[in-house]
Image: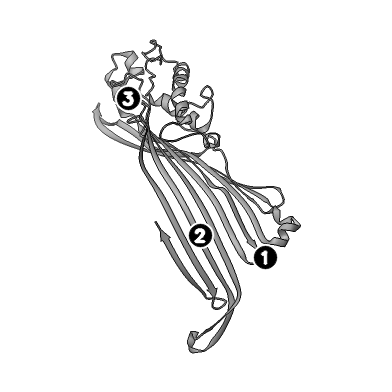
């Protein structure tokens, strides 16, 4: 499902809204053929459902929280949310209670349970209250993201006198994704094996951590958002000088249920562009064997961008945040273009990356 809309609440202000939800599911099943009363009967064996999921969401409430290799406000909130979610899940699932573990969590819903971690993670990084966040794996309603452009400053007499064009732009995108999910075949097998034990057959338990087994196995879930851009200023002055200034930020948060680690990738990018238009530049060429005089605009443009990426791994079990990788990327781009004819353009460019 993909929904797009354009709103124009006032002249010169355009807001583009985008919301999407993608759900993919496949069923794979084997059959065993049995002969019963002389007839063939197909008995299903280990049906396995697998797929992926993605939905647009909102994380803007936590994007400016402190987050470095030493401390993270959102990650601390994530850890605190677990006990709240565990009690909610215990009450919501209406499974038999057998007391609390050594850390105060309901038994069968420990601090590393998938059913506890996912809502606690989602609540912490979307800025929702853990007491009210949706406990389901799949969200139903996509939340719109946006792109905003404003050109109304050109209505001012001062701006008209100084600029040919002047625009401001801001955009935001965020998504919640499950890269892969599949049926928990171990749970199905335990249900079959424990037919003589009614409690275990209904509520099979993970033999490693003694938590209830979930219906689906999720390798990891991902939350990502980006200001694309946070702010963009683009203008051209009456003297043909053009300026582009832009700031972009992005972050990706990946929670692994295999080792209870969260990988956090933060990126910032700064761009400054300058341009100049030389009007009515004359050239003499021999295109097609004939001497020809050309007259057109020569456009020069240079962009300088600096990007800083950092990857931090955070451990839910121990206080051990580690920077595992990072990059500083410097990019310089220069272009010069000239209209040789109405249908032929010449372009010179130079790109440098460090």
Q: How many marks?
A: 3
Residue at the far right: name it: 157
Q: Closest to the observer: 260 or 75? A: 75
Q: Is residue 117 visible?
A: yes
Left or right of residue 144: residue 67: left
The image shows residue 338, relative to residue 161, as above or below, that is below
Give the residue pinned by disc 2: 303
The quarter holding residue 96 reads top left
The quarter holding residue 24 reads top left
Whole-percent x, y for residue 338 in the image: 54, 74
**Mark 3 and mark 2: span between their CA atoms?**
56 Å
Give the residue pinned by disc 3: 187
Nearest-to-viewer mark from 1 and 3: 1
Q: Residue at x 29, y 25 (%)?
A: 189
Whole-percent x, y for residue 51 in the image: 39, 38
Whole-percent x, y for residue 305 in the image: 48, 55
Tags 1 and 2 touching, CB below 8 Å: no
The image shows residue 207, relative to residue 71, as above or below, that is above
Q: Is residue 1 visible?
A: no
Whole-percent x, y for residue 58 in the image: 54, 37
Label 2's element? strand
Q: Residue at x 53, y 30 (%)?
A: 127
Sequence order check, earlier mark of 1 and 3: 3
């Amino acid at each position: 499902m993909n929904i797009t809309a354009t709103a124009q609440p006032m002249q010169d202000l355009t807001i583009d809204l985008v919301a999407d939800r993608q759900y993919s599911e496949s069923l794979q099943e084997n059959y065993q053929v049995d002969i019963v009363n002389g007839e063939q009967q197909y008995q299903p064996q280990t049906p396995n459902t697998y797929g992926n999921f993605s939905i647009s969401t909102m994380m803007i409430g936590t994007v400016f929280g402190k987050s470095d290799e030493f401390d993270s406000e959102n990650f601390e909130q994530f850890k605190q949310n677990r006990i709240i979610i565990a009690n909610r899940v215990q009450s919501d699932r209406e499974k038999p209670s057998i007391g609390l573990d050594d850390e105060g969590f309901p038994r069968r819903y420990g601090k590393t349970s998938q059913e506890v971690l996912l809502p606690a993670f989602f609540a912490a990084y979307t800025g929702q209250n853990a007491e009210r966040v949706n406990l389901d794996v799949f969200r139903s309603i996509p939340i719109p993201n946006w792109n905003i452009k404003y050109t109304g400053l050109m209505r001012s007499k001062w701006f008209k006198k100084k600029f040919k064009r002047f625009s401001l732009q801001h955009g935001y995108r965020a998504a919640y994704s499950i890269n892969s999910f599949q049926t928990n075949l171990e749970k199905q097998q335990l249900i079959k094996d424990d037919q003589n034990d009614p409690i275990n057959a209904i509520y099979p338990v993970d033999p490693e951590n003694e938590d209830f087994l979930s219906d689906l196995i999720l390798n990891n879930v991902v939350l990502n958002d980006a200001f694309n851009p946070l702010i963009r200023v683009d203008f051209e002055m009456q003297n043909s000088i053009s300026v582009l200034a832009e700031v972009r930020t992005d972050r990706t948060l990946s929670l692994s249920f295999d080792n209870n680690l969260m990988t956090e990738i933060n990126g910032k990018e700064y761009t400054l562009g300058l341009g100049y238009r030389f009007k009515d530049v004359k050239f003499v060429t021999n295109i097609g064997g004939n001497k020809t005089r050309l007259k057109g605009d020569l456009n020069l443009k240079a962009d300088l961008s600096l990007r800083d990426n950092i990857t931090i791994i955070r451990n839910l079990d121990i206080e051990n945040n580690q920077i595992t990788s990072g990059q500083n990327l410097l990019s310089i781009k220069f272009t010069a273009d000239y209209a040789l004819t109405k249908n032929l353009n010449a372009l010179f460019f130079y790109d440098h990356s460090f």
